[in-house]
Image (spheres, grey):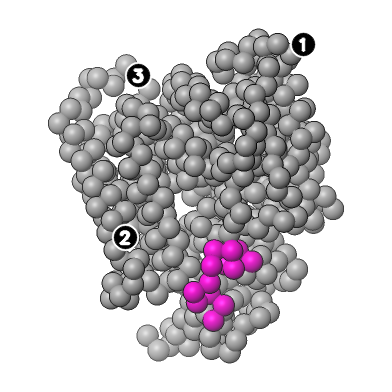
């Protein structure tokens, strides 16, 4: 064991360091009790593209971080088996056998079994649900289309929770019911605790978190909230599931779990459900919220999108379909640029299961590999001198061909990319296609004054403050 530690530190010592670290402590003093905003600023500092790749930072004397942002190195990290695992950091999500946190053969088998839950046929079957749920969202937001400022993320969170429960679990209801409202509050509270456990890693040790207020919040929102909802849901599903009921229709996430019941034990089913609901609603809700704010900040782009919607749809309430969705080519560019400019997840982490040669350095086994998505998406070497500007046109055919393949990764890349990435982009496009037919959005915020924070997903410190006014889509010539 001592020889292994010696080799670990010997290999680590050869990798260039990021600036601003203290001897022994590394970055621990800057992380301790830091706010989400401070964490985001620290990540921007240590993940800055200025410097050699790979480069190292010490979170503690025992936790080594290796930052990788070179294209060829990223390709290797994303594709080789020894970098496919995730670190113990993800245990904060309290779903150890779910796709987000599991590793090895367990993750590999589950991913293979669950991939069909998001195939083309299933996604096509979701479109009527997405239309219905988005129409409800428009009715709810119509009450706020008086030009007064409000935070739209609250509504997008409720809407996204409604979507993921209906599509992936077949849970019937809407976001206004008490049961779902309570569940949403538990997920919001649970994500708050999870963020604290990730950024204050010592809280992942039970004897320590039990001494803090976060332990009671964890019990309230996660143990007695999310976990109880999932257990009750599975109990009911086990009583009613009949494989013959799904044999002639697209089989959604919950169907895949129960159809292959022999491949999943009870804990694994519960963890997979908690994982898909939590990650699905969070990324969708804040991608939509960030996108609405960005288009409020860029009215010319908003109007260009509106013009396309006028050309494609005959009325404000015409449903999005398999026929008109491909016609929304500018919307497609806008969504891609939203996910580049403010990616919902600003950083992901891999964990080496063996020594890995990255660039000119041998990276030790059991090391955290940091992939700084936000910084890669802003790297002028990949995206040009206007990388810090919001320009959907950069994704047009010939222009985008000049961008390296591994420079765009809003949902990660490789075998461990987001299982629901096609679901998420489809849902975002459908929602925005309705939203901007009905509303003009403005904001008093200035882009240069907006601060982002790390709260599992990317959020705006000042809130997602917008003003809505009704459009006259059917009356406009």
Q: Quadrant of residue 335?
A: top right
Please give the label number shown on residue 249. 3
- Asked if residue 47 lies left or right of residue 94, the reply is right
Q: Residue at x 77, y 27 (%)?
A: 304
Real-space CA distance between mark 2 and mark 3, rounded to the nearest whole angstrom: 38 Å
Residue 40 highlighted magenta (yes or no) = yes
Real-space CA distance between mark 1 and mark 3, rounded to the nearest whole angstrom: 41 Å
Q: Magenta residues?
A: 29-41
Front in this rendered view, residue 242 or 465: 465
Q: Residue at x 32, y 26 (%)?
A: 172
Q: Please tell me whether residue 332 is drawn above or below residue 70 in the rendered image.
A: above
Q: Quadrant of residue 320?
A: top right
Q: Please tell me whether residue 15 is drawn above or below residue 379 in the rendered image.
A: below
Position of residue 236 measured from the top left corner of the image (x, y, whole percent): 18, 34
SS for callout 3:
loop
For marks 2 and 1, the one nearer the N-term is: 2
SS for callout 1:
loop
Position of residue 165 measured from the top left corner of the image (x, y, whole percent): 37, 34
For marks 1 and 3, the one nearer the N-term is: 3
Q: Please tell me whether residue 114 is drawn above or below residue 378 in the rendered image.
A: above
Front in this rendered view, residue 67 or 301: 301
Q: Residue at x 54, y 63 (%)?
A: 36
- Asked if residue 141 lies left or right of residue 304, the reply is left
Within 10 angstroms of label 1, few (less than 14), some, or many (20 or more) residues?
A: few
Q: Which residue is mark 2?
A: 218
């Amino acid at each position: 064991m001592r020889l292994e530690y010696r080799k670990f530190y010997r290999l680590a010592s050869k990798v260039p360091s990021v600036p601003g670290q203290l001897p022994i402590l590394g970055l621990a003093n800057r992380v301790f009790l830091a706010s989400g905003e401070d964490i985001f600023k620290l990540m921007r500092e240590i993940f800055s593209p200025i410097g050699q790749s790979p480069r190292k930072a010490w979170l503690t004397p025992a936790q080594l971080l290796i930052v990788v942002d070179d294209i060829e190195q990223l390709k290797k990290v994303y594709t080789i088996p020894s970098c496919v695992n995730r670190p113990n950091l993800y245990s904060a999500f309290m779903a150890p056998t779910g796709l987000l946190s599991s590793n090895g053969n367990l993750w590999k088998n589950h991913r293979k079994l669950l991939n069909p839950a998001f195939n083309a046929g299933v996604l096509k079957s979701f479109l009527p649900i997405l239309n219905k749920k988005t129409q409800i969202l428009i009715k709810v937001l119509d009450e706020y289309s008086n030009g007064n400022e409000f935070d739209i993320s609250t509504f997008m969170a409720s809407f996204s929770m409604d979507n993921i429960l209906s599509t992936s679990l077949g849970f019937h209801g809407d976001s206004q019911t008490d049961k779902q409202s309570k569940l949403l509050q538990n997920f919001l509270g649970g994500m708050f605790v999870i963020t604290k456990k990730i950024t204050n890693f010592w809280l992942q040790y039970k004897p320590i978190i039990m001494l803090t207020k976060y332990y009671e919040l964890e019990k309230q929102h996660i143990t007695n909230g999310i976990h109880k909802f999932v257990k009750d849901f599975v109990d009911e599903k086990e009583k009613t599931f009949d494989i013959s009921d799904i044999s002639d229709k697209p089989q959604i996430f919950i169907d895949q779990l129960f159809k292959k019941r022999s491949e999943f034990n009870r804990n694994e089913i519960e963890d997979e459900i908690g994982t898909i609901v939590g990650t699905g609603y969070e990324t969708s809700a804040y991608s939509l919220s960030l996108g609405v704010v960005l288009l409020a900040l860029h009215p010319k782009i908003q109007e260009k999108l509106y013009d396309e919607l006028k050309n494609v749809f005959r009325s404000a309430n015409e449903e999005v379909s398999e026929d008109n969705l491909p016609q929304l080519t500018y919307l497609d560019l806008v969504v891609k640029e939203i996910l580049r400019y403010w990616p919902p997840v600003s950083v992901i982490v891999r964990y080496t299961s063996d020594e890995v040669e990255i660039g000119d350095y041998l990276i030790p086994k059991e090391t955290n590999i940091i992939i700084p998505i936000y910084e890669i998406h802003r790297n002028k070497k990949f995206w040009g001198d206007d990388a810090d500007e919001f320009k959907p046109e950069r994704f047009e055919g010939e222009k985008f061909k000049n961008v390296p393949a591994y420079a765009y990764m809003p949902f990660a890349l490789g075998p461990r990319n987001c299982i629901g990435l096609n679901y998420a982009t489809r849902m975002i496009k459908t929602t925005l296609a309705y939203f901007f037919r009905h509303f003009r959005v403005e904001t008093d915020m200035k882009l240069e004054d907006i601060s982002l924070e790390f709260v599992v997903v990317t959020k705006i410190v000042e809130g997602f403050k917008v003003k809505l006014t009704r459009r006259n889509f059917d009356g406009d010539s």
